[in-house]
């Protein structure tokens, strides 16, 4: 894993925040499916995160998930 200067976490259930996070120039953006997403929104959030990951970007993208 490369050494990163900046890691930016963004809640996966807010499309506007995801889009903005991916444009801010961070070395890596971590889209959060864990604590910041209410349990009732998890399924819809997975679709938003998958859509964001499919778009070409200049930074690394990761997804933070709950433990099994």
Image (cartoon, rainbow, N blue to C red):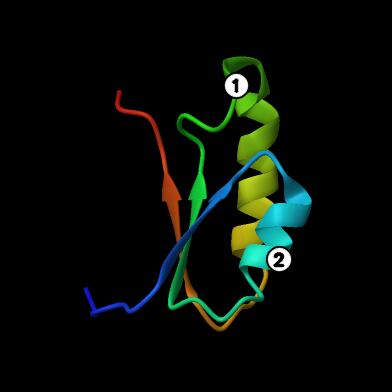
Q: Position of 35 compared to 52: left or right?
A: left
Q: Is residue 36 above or below residue 5?
A: above
Residue located beneath label 2 in the image: 20
Residue 56 coordinates in the image, percent (x, y): 64, 77
Label 1's element?
loop
Image point 30% across, 23% down: which residue? 68
Image point 47% across, 29% down: which residue? 35
Q: Is residue 56 above or below residue 53?
A: below
Image point 62% across, 65% down: which residue? 21
Label 2's element?
helix
Residue 2 coordinates in the image, percent (x, y): 24, 79
Residue 64 coordinates in the image, percent (x, y): 41, 44
Image point 75% across, 50% down: which residue? 15
Question: Considering only order in the chain, which callout, 2 or 1, is on the residue closer to the N terminus?
Answer: 2
Residue located beneath label 1 in the image: 38
Q: Position of 61 compared to 53: left or right?
A: left
Q: Is residue 13 above or below residue 66?
A: below
């Amino acid at each position: 894993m490369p050494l990163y200067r900046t890691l930016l976490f963004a809640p996966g259930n807010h499309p506007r925040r995801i889009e903005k996070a991916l444009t801010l120039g961070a070395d890596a953006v971590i889209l959060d499916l864990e604590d910041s997403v209410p349990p009732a929104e998890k399924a819809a959030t997975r679709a938003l995160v998958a859509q964001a990951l499919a778009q070409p970007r200049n930074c690394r993208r990761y997804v933070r998930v709950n433990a099994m």
